[in-house]
Each structure stands twice: as structure tokens, then as C-alpha cells.
Image (cartoon, coloured by chain):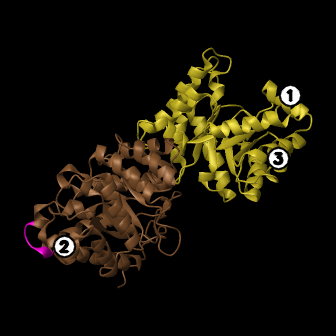
């Protein structure tokens, strides 16, 4: 499972403030803590309030790479912000993200090819987020086909079916899970599948419980990557256990520790 | 039409463990990135190694077929060890401290350690040292042996899930490697590696003993456990990425097929078991009959040479 740590995001108050005031310790601690907790990739997002997202992206990447040898997922709607970041990354990065709109894909896949990155493909377009699995699949196929045009392997695409909050779009949980299962059939080798997990519990009570229950269900449906809070230990334990039950790792009494020693 | 073979590529590798003092005499095992001898799929930087086994006392219970090649040296552990190296070309020896066992002479641990020190002085090859199989006796003799050979980078055994702390602590203190044994059980193998490394021991200095069984006595169970562990290691399970040691000689020469018919059958039984274990992923084979050891080494060199003699 590719665990993408979500915490370095200017949307969170503390992080937004740290970015504004260039409090490097805050960012570096978040980077180190997430890696220690099992993240293999860190998402980097300057947040909606950044006055100079290009400079903030550069500062975040430089700050993180001083303390953590980790892949980064550059999270921005603006291709020029992403490109500034790609110039600095030391390990192979993920672009987060493109939609299934042709002009957007052209811009993002050009960058992906130039900088040899992986790409998160959101199965949505200008008409919005689909409300059923069929439309999600159609958009996923559009993304894979476009990637092929750019000679980007399906293995380097992480298809995101877009998780919606359970308290506002309760019918979508099932559609998303089914989509994860079917995305994998789109090509051989199969594309990765990814979800932005925390969105499922946005505005709801018992967020951690909802998150980990959904993650386990998604893992059972073949999910291979997730953007999540790796510091939620119960969440990580549930994920490790789900993968154990699916025979992805060999059991031993200390299987939680064993996973973390990887 | 040509057929293209599908090749597996793995990201993980088996740990490389060195035995003996650094330098020309040390023996390295492990390091491979492929299942045994599949050179199209990965590397085997270190050929599997055959160790000859020596007891610290006369092995009165051994089959006559097995004692014969050593002649009178079988009565003198130091002469025996020398003969293994000078006459039979052993590159590494396994000394079994059997004499402390109550059924084998019940000697004091100090006497056993004195013999071990004499052997270590007499031969210039790296050593594997294992206890008698009695936990209480071994927890007495092995720490003393470890201290006596401090810095020699011995491979000491045997740690089990119920008895690993004493040996781990002493190997850690004296700079030795350790054998971790599990009862044909991959889950316990992994657990024991975690328990040992939780004591601060470098997992890179652990060699696994998955339990050895002889041809005809369930060898295929060991084979399947070894193969499963290897596949897990190659996809990144660090707690199963250790080289394997197999005590082929002691298991084979327990069987009636080896010891009760004729010498040739016994030797062949030992070779057949050894080469099967090589195909399962064995890195270190501890063998008893020098002819069986020699044939197994020849087999290894042919396979390492891509099948050419």
C-alpha cells in the first residue's frame, strides 16, 4: 500500500500559519512524523490562502527534503506551481492531480513526461463529480487512453474515484468501492487506485472510525494507495491488518511492528 | 516463432552475512535477488557454502560409515577439524558442543570451551558453533564460548522462540552472528527475527534455520516454507530477508536409509537432501560425510557456472 501523508496542507490552520510565517520546524516535524508513522509519500499543498503559491511550494519542498528522504506528491490545481516544485524534487514525484478534461490532461501529462512523474487522475471533469460507477469508469478510461498517447504507463497513473462525505452523499460509498474494483480491469498492467480518504468523514461525527472502516473496505476492493493521516495509529493498524488478511504480508504475532520495520 | 520467457523482477534482496574475521578467510552468504540459480532474473553474488561438522568429543553414536573417512582423528576434535580443512578442503567448519549434554559425556562448559578454543587456534577457517540441544546446558556453555571467541565473528546457534535471549545478548556483546530456528513455521520464523532484533541485534547478522528434514522425512514441507519466505523477502519483507542454514548431515545420518545399508547409499542420501535444499534457497549447508560435501560443492560450482562443468 502506498501511504501518502496528507498533513502538509495549508488548508489546515497550523500549517497555513507556518507557511505564512515560514516556521520551518512545524513543517519538518510533520514530515518526519508522517514518515516515521509509515508514509512513503508526502502530499504537499500550499493551501487556498497562500499569497504566492509558487514560492511557498518551493519553500515547503526544500524544507521537507532537508529532513526527509521521501517522495512528494505535489498538490495544486495550478500547473505552473507544480512545475516549480518538480524542478526541486529529489525523488520521483506524483502530480496531484489532473481531471479528465482534455486541456488539463495535456498540461499535466506534458509535465509528467518531462519530469518522469506519476499522476493522480481524478475521475471528474467540468461537468462535475459523477454519481455512478459507469461514468467514473468512462472518465478513468479517458485518462488511461490519454496517458497512453503521452507514452505514460498505466502503472504510473493513480486513478481517484473521488470519495464524497458520507453525510451528504451516502449513495456514493458503494459506487466508489465498485469503481476501485473495476478500475483495475482497465489495463494490464493495472493502474493504481487512490483515494483522498478523509473526505469520507468530512463534517461527520466519529471521523476516525468512519475513515478506518472505509479504508479497510477499499483495501478489500483492491485499493493500492491512499492519501490519509498516517498519525492516526488506529487507522494505520486497520490498514496493516486488512493487508495481512488479504495475504499481502506474512503473519507473525508482532505483525504490526513487522510492517513498521519494513 | 520464438517464445519469450516471462521473467520475474524483484525489488528486495537477501541480507549478506559474513562469517569469520574480515579478510581473505571470511565467508559470505546471501545477497541474492532471485530464487536459486535463476540468473536471468537476478543475481547470486555469493555461492552457497558447505560447512563440515565436527563434534567437540568422539561421536560414539555416529554410523561407522560416517566415522570411517576421518580415521583415528574422529577421537580427537582438534585433529578432526584439521583433517576437515587440510584433507577435505573445508572452507568453514561447524563445531557442535555436544560434550556438555548429559547423554554425551556431561562435560563441564569450561572443558568444552577449552576444546573449542583449541580448534579455533588450529584451523584458519571461519566457524559456526552450535550447542548440544539442551537449553540449560547451552545457556551455560554458549555465553562462555562466545566470550572466548570474542571478535572472531562466529555464527552461533541455536536461538529458538522459547530460548533466544541469552544467546542474543551474548552474541550482541561479543560481535557474533546468530542462528534463529523455527519449527517449519514461517510465522514463528518471522516472529523470532523480530524478537531478536527488538533486543537491539542487527537483523543483518541473523541466519535462519527453518528446520532441516531429510529426504524421505518431509523435506518438501521445509522446501515450501523456504520458498514462501524467499518470495516475501523479495517483495520487501525485511523480517524474512535472512540467509538460510540447513543442518543436512545431522538429519540425514539419523535415518535408517543412510546409516543401515551401505556407505554409498548414506552419502547419496546426504547429497540428494543437500541439493534439494540448495534448490529451495539454502545458503549454508552443514554436512557430515566429506564425499557428500565434495559432491555438493561440485554441484554448486556447476550451477553457479550456468550449468557448465
Dividing the picture into quarters, in which one does residue B57 lie? bottom left
Res B267 label: 2
Q: Position of residue A153 (x, y in %)?
A: 62, 56
Specify whether residue B280 is in view: no
- Residue B74, above or below A96: below
Question: Tag 3's secondary structure?
Answer: helix
Q: CA distance from mark 3 to mark 2?
A: 64 Å
Q: Which residue is mark 1?
A: A17
**Does the magenta run of residues contain A109?**
no
Tag 3 subunit: A
Secondary structure state at the residue bearing disc 1: helix
Please report whichever mark, 1 or 3, sits nearer to the chain's N-terminal start: 1
Numbered badge on residue A62: 3
How crowded is the residue under tag 2: few (<14 C-alpha within 10 Å), some, or many (20+)? Answer: many
Q: Are marks 1 and 3 on the same chain?
A: yes
Question: Where in the figure is residue A61, as x and y percent of width and height?
Answer: 80, 45
Q: Quadrant of the N terminus of chain B?
A: bottom left
Which region shows up in magenta? B260-264
Q: Please name the color used to draw chain A.
A: yellow
Mark 1 or 2, which is nearer the eye?
A: 2
> Can the viewer see residue A170?
yes
Element at badge 2? helix
Viewer-proximal residue among A161 and B280? B280
Image position of A25 (left or right of B280): right
Q: Residues within 10 Å of mark 1 (few under 14, many from 20)?
A: some
Amino acid at each position: 500500500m502506498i501511504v501518502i501523508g496528507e498533513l502538509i496542507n495549508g488548508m489546515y490552520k497550523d500549517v497555513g500559519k507556518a507557511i505564512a510565517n515560514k516556521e520551518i520546524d512545524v513543517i519538518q516535524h510533520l514530515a518526519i512524523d508522517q514518515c516515521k508513522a509509515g508514509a512513503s509519500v508526502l502530499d504537499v499543498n500550499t493551501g487556498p490562502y497562500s499569497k504566492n503559491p509558487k514560492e511557498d511550494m518551493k519553500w515547503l519542498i526544500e524544507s521537507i527534503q532537508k529532513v526527509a528522504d521521501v517522495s512528494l506528491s505535489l498538490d495544486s490545481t495550478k500547473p505552473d506551481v507544480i512545475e516549480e516544485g518538480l524542478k526541486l524534487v529529489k525523488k520521483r514525484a506524483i502530480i496531484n492531480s489532473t481531471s479528465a478534461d482534455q486541456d488539463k490532461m495535456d498540461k499535466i501529462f506534458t509535465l509528467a513526461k518531462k519530469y518522469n512523474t506519476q499522476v493522480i487522475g481524478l475521475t471528474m471533469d467540468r461537468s462535475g463529480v459523477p454519481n455512478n460507477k459507469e461514468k467514473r469508469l468512462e472518465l478513468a478510461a479517458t485518462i488511461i487512453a490519454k496517458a497512453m498517447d503521452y507514452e505514460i504507463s498505466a502503472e504510473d497513473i493513480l486513478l481517484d474515484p473521488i470519495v464524497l462525505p458520507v453525510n451528504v452523499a451516502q449513495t456514493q460509498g458503494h459506487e466508489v468501492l465498485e469503481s476501485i474494483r473495476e478500475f483495475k480491469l482497465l489495463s494490464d498492467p493495472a493502474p493504481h487506485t487512490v483515494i483522498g480518504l478523509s473526505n469520507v468523514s468530512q463534517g461527520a461525527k466519529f471521523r476516525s472510525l468512519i475513515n478506518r472502516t472505509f479504508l479497510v473496505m477499499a483495501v478489500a476492493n483492491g485499493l493500492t494507495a491512499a492519501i490519509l493521516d498516517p498519525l492516526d495509529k488506529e487507522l494505520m493498524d486497520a490498514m496493516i491488518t486488512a493487508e495481512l488478511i488479504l495475504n499481502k504480508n506474512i503473519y507473525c504475532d508482532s505483525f504490526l511492528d513487522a510492517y513498521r520495520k519494513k | 516463432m520464438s517464445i519469450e520467457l516471462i521473467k520475474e523482477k524483484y525489488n528486495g534482496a537477501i541480507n549478506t552475512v559474513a562469517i569469520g574475521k574480515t579478510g581473505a578467510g571470511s565467508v559470505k552468504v546471501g545477497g541474492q535477488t532471485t530464487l536459486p540459480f535463476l540468473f536471468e532474473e537476478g543475481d547470486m553474488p555469493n555461492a552457497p557454502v558447505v560447512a563440515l561438522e565436527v563434534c567437540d568429543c568422539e561421536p560414539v553414536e555416529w554410523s561407522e560409515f560416517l566415522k570411517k573417512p576421518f580415521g583415528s582423528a574422529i577421537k580427537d576434535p582438534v585433529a578432526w577439524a584439521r583433517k576437515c580443512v587440510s584433507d577435505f578442503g573445508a572452507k568453514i567448519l561447524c563445531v557442535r558442543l555436544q560434550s556438555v549434554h548429559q547423554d554425551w559425556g556431561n562435560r563441564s562448559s569450561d572443558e568444552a570451551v577449552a576444546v573449542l578454543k583449541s580448534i579455533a587456534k588450529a584451523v584458519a577457517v571461519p566457524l559456526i558453533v552450535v550447542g548440544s540441544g539442551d537449553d540449560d546446558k547451552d545457556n551455560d556453555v554458549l555465553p562462555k564460548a562466545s566470550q572466548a571467541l570474542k571478535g572472531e565473528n562466529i555464527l552461533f546457534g541455536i536461538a529458538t522462540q522459547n530460548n533466544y535471549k541469552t544467546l542474543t545478548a551474548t552474541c550482541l556483546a561479543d560481535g557474533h552472528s546468530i542462528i534463529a530456528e523455527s519449527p517449519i513455521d514461517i510465522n514463528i520464523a518471522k516472529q523470532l527475527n523480530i524478537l531478536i532484533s527488538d533486543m537491539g541485534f542487527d537483523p543483518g547478522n541473523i541466519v535462519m534455520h527453518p528446520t532441516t528434514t531429510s529426504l524421505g522425512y518431509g523435506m518438501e514441507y521445509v522446501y515450501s516454507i523456504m520458498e514462501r519466505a524467499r518470495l516475501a523477502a523479495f517483495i520487501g519483507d525485511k523480517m524474512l530477508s535472512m540467509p538460510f542454514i540447513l543442518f543436512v548431515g545431522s538429519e540425514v545420518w539419523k535415518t535408517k536409509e543412510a546409516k543401515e545399508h551401505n556407505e554409498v547409499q548414506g552419502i547419496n542420501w546426504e547429497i540428494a537432501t543437500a541439493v534439494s535444499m540448495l534448490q529451495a534457497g539454502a545458503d549454508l549447508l552443514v554436512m557430515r560425510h566429506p564425499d557428500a560435501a565434495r559432491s555438493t560443492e561440485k554441484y554448486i560450482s556447476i550451477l553457479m557456472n550456468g550449468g557448465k562443468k
